[in-house]
Amino acid sequence: MPELEGAVAEAPVESSVSADQGAVQESAAPAEVETQGTETQTETEGQSQEQPATGKFDAAGLIKDPQKREALKSLDPSLPGFIRDAVWSKKQADAAGGLASLLETHKFVSEIGGREFVEQAKTEISEWNALDQAFTEGKPDFVKQIAQGDPEAFEKMVPFAIQELASVAPEQYQHIMARVMVNTFDGAGITNGLRGLLQNVDEAVKPQVQAFIDWVESFRQTASKIPEKKIDPERQKFDQERQQFAQKQAEMLVKSVDADSIRHRDSVIAREIKPFGDWDTMDGDRKGAVASWISQRIGKQLQADKGFLNRRDTLIANGDREGLAKLEQAKLDELVPKLVPSAAKVFGVTKAAGKTQEKAKPGVVAAKPKGVTVLSKAPSADQIDRFKTKPEDIFKNQAVLKNGTRVQWA
């Protein structure tokens, strides 16, 4: 920058005696300012050069800033779009576990045979799952599929299957064999033939022929009656104990999470009710009424939320306490703030009421209504009839006891 260098070189002339001293002084001042500007600019450039090394580059912010976006377009019109696509690609990669994870997955898929192998494996797994389901449900399709898949192997397997059936389910084996015998006898016309023979033989032979007919017909009853499945008492006992244990675990899980949810509910109420009154200094009956009122309305909303209920049941079945707690607390965060203003209005929660309560002298009782019994202290919760006692009665230190007595206390 020659002009700046020249100006700096002329600066010492200011100290020499000359008729043009004033002019020199006037020219020296701009040079000094110019020099300072150069130093400041150099310093700023140094800072801007060092900043990317310590700061975090915000590509999304770069393309959102209109001035920076226009500056990029001046360099290359396609730069903003390129950066936008790069930002989107990075977000997708991060959501999938990062670039390293994607490369590792790609390497694994390539090693096992690529996308075609994976698709083929998925198809085969689906077919095997369908076959397994058909076997579990006892569908005829299962037998047809394995018979058609390898007829020779199926033919070899059937005798062993029959032998195993006789061992594990004797009554079912007899039922099936009886059906085979009846079909065989009926197909050959043995029963009708024996009955015709019975009419033409000597009386001495008839008992033997009738006995043979009775033996043949005995298979018909066994073939027509499907044996009932016997329940193993030990197995049944084991299943019952397992169900009871699972139910007990689920109840303990729900009870534990409910305790956390109640504490979280109260913390949200305390935060949201501040514009109306102080939750910490509020009397217990009023706090209980507010919390109960809010919980009842949340319960009604959640009972109609099938998605929430299904998710909750799944988490309970899986024993996922952390997931269940997060699910319930998220719903409380969503619903409680919406209900607090209405609850404060219904139950008269105001800062003025709180101050009045704090200043109230102990032992002072409001004017006693007719037919009210005055107590020296509040009755216990189990003495109060909650169906006959209204929330506003509690706020007046009044209640109806389970024996029907209306009371008031200090």
Image: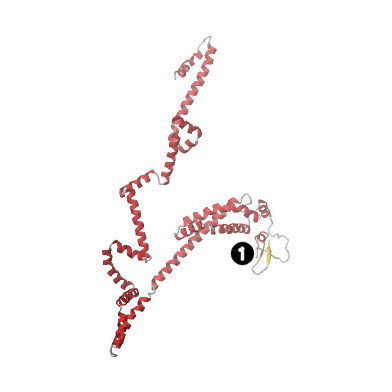
Which residue is found at the position 54% from the left and 15% from the top? 26
Q: Does dot 1 land on a helix, a strand or a loop? A: helix
- In the rendered image, the vertical position of residue 148 relative to residue 2, given as above or below: below
Residue 359 x/y as whole percent: 68, 54
- Tell me, yes or no, if residue 375 can be seen here: no
- In the rendered image, the vertical position of residue 53 relative to residue 395, given as above or below: above
398 relative to 327 in the view: left or right: right
- In the rendered image, the vertical position of residue 251 relative to residue 5, given as above or below: below
158 relative to 240 in the view: left or right: left
Q: Quadrant of the N terminus?
A: top left
Residue matched to label 1: 381
Residue 66 x/y as whole percent: 50, 34
- In the rendered image, the vertical position of residue 157 relative to residue 280, given as above or below: below
Which residue is found at the position 48% from the left and 58% from the top? 310
- Can you tell which quarter of the image residue 358 is in? bottom right
Q: Amino acid at mark 1?
A: Ala
Which residue is found at the position 50% from the left and 55% from the top? 327
Q: Quadrant of the C terminus?
A: bottom right
Q: Determine crowd level at label 1: few under 14, some 14-19, many 20+ residues with C-alpha closer than 10 A.
A: few
Residue 253 x/y as whole percent: 48, 60
Residue 88 x/y as whole percent: 44, 41
Which residue is found at the position 57% from the left and 59% from the top? 300
Q: Toward the viewer: 117 or 185?
A: 185
